[in-house]
Amino acid sequence: MADHHFGGIKIRHLYKIFGPNAQAHVDAVKNGLTKAELNERHGHVLGLRDINIEMPSGCIQVIMGLSGSGKSTLIRHINRLIDPTAGEVLVDGIDVVKMNEQELRTFRRHQTAMVFQKFALLPHRNVLDNTLYGLEVQGMERAKAVDTAMRWIERVGLKGFESKYPNQLSGGMQQRVGLARALSNDAPVLLMDEAYSALDPLIRMDMQTVLLDLQKEIRKTVVFITHDLDEALRLGDQIAILRDGEVIQQGTSQDIVLRPADDYVANFVKEVNRGRVVHVEAVMVPMRPGASPVGTPIEVGTTIEDAMRMIAHGPDGDVAAVDAEGKPVGIIDLRLLAGALVSAHGDPQQTDASLAKVM
Ligand SMILES: Nc1ncnc2c1ncn2[C@@H]1O[C@H](COP(=O)(O)OP(=O)(O)OP(=O)(O)O)[C@@H](O)[C@H]1O
């Protein structure tokens, strides 16, 4: 088991129709029957249509969309709390849809962990006993379970709170317990359904930071559901945007902010602080022969905001953008960086045009 490399999650041609006779309508939906038509003509609800997402091992996959777009329906297919009408859900190469009850129980217990919006802590158990609950269910001996749980309690920043009860903790602290409990069972898949949506904005940011810091080390395959674009852009290695049960765009934060697939996405993206999302490589220009860059080179992957902060205090002139090995790959300057920020308020086309002008 130790040297087995977890294969990630692959969702293929997944359809979900809600209603008593779902199977009877799946072909019509595959042939283009719309959600509205399915509802009007047959009284069935289209939950998901032809979802295809590959979630590589060790990445944070964000699923984002407005209320009713199908996010919860989708994440619940991953541990088969919902049976699909058609399609495959491969977790580490095995189709969850084909598992029998026994296999499913083992799979859920050992391969997946969930963090809920409402924390779902047991009120009569203290922090320690909430954290080790899953290990107890698995039949782990007490001393070992305590050991494991204490390690995660410390990692989520709750050391010293082991014997507190949920009602003695703030929302953010309760969510830390939820996270510690989820991490204690050492499952490769972490499912987070609007996990931070009930938290105050600052606490929410804190919890995002906790997750990002932990993830550098634990490298779980995280599926994170949110309706908040800033959260999606901050957390997601990959983001899938859902509308009416369909994926309308998949990509990195960069892809989504720089090239929104349609008006729906563009509308989400409009208010985003691009300086915190867009990387310097999106605005750099080719290195000119004979150019003599000044100041400290800036590595690709640096956000525009960070780059501006670095450049603003350096000498005037062109600054080299370099790859991870320090090799120059382009040139940036304050004007290019600033241009990418202010043109953000136009439509994407116009943004490209005005960028072209400053270049
Ligand atoms: N058990 C069900 N029976 C009938 N329709 C359902 C059922 N569950 C979900 N739906 C419908 O499926 C669609 C997707 O719902 P879902 O709850 O997955 O969306 P969501 O993006 O998670 O929204 P929210 O953020 O409000 O939870 C909606 O049209 C919803 O009404």
Image: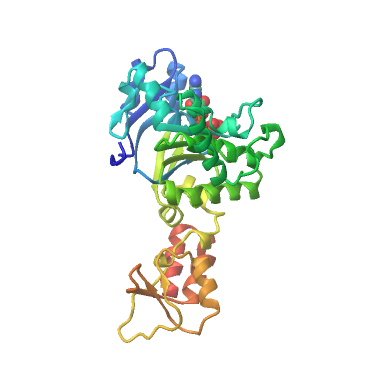
Q: Residue at x 35, y 43 (%)?
A: 57
Q: Residue at x 56, y 35 (%)?
A: 178
Q: Toward which corner of the image does residue 37 lie, by quadrant? A: top left
**Colour convention:** rainbow
Query: Which quadrant would the N terminus be assigned to in this image?
Result: top left
Most foreground residue, 153 or 274? 153
Q: Position of residue 287 (x, y in %)?
A: 34, 78
Q: Position of residue 193 (x, y in %)?
A: 51, 35
Does residue 194 appear anywhere in the picture? no
Snapshot quadrant of residue 91: top left
Relative to 242, does residue 109 appear above or below in the rendering?
A: above
Q: Residue at x 55, y 77 (%)?
A: 312
Residue 122 in picture, x, y percent from top left:
62, 26
Q: Quadrant of the C terminus?
A: bottom left
In the rendered image, residue 113, in percent from the top left (x then y), is placed at 46, 33
Relative to 45, say whether 271 is above or below: below
